[in-house]
Image: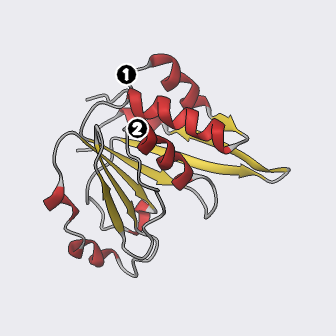
Amino acid sequence: MRYSLNHRMLESLLLKGVSCSSLGETHRLSAEFALALSKDKIVYFHGDLGSGKTSFIQGMAKTYGIQTSITSPTFNLWHHYKGSVNLFHLDAYRLHSPEETDHLYLEDFLVSPYVICIEWPEKLLDGYLKPHFHLWFSQKKEHPNERIIRLSPEDFVLNS
């Protein structure tokens, strides 16, 4: 099965990588991404600290009509925000072992329509909440305020 965004031009741009040099640009891109997602999707966010992952999620939240301030749930591990879509923001950075994934119980709170955004997914137990999409965030050394946001081409093949 092939997953795709509901916006072919955005999908094509993200597969090549989109450069954002301001918070406003990041929020505009994330708003388009949020609108292009169909309901009940899981997105893995990859990138170093400070690469723009949480900023991207803030833009998605605003698009879903969420007025609450969105911060990284590093110490709480995950937050649930109610809007036109239930947004779950999981930050696995502080997990010490993949086995701690069993104590998250996030799947017990899922109410459709939802989008789950997971930062630091490599720290989760393999197979926990399999993603529909992977977004990669990187910074250019010569332009530290510029982020490149890219959708992985392998996202379009469902792992069994």
x and y percent of residue 42 in the render? 32, 46
Instruction: Give above or below for 72 relative to 31.
Output: below
| Whole-number angstrom distance, CA of label 1 to CA of label 2 | 14 Å
x and y percent of residue 118 in the render? 39, 56
Residue underneath mark 2: 155
Q: Residue at x 33, y 74 (%)?
A: 98
Q: Nearer the viewer, mark 1 or mark 2?
A: 1
Residue underneath mark 1: 6
Q: Amino acid at mark 1?
A: Asn
10 or 114, which lies in front? 114
Number of callouts in the render? 2
48 or 70, which lies in front? 70
Q: Residue at x 47, y 48 (%)?
A: 57
76 or 158, which lies in front? 76
Q: Amino acid at mark 2?
A: Asp
Instruction: Give above or below for 83 relative to 126.
Output: above
Which label is found at residue 32?
none
Q: Quadrant of residue 104?
A: bottom left
Q: Residue furthest bottom?
A: 96
- Does label 1 or label 2 sit earlier along the sequence? 1
x and y percent of residue 127 in the render? 26, 58
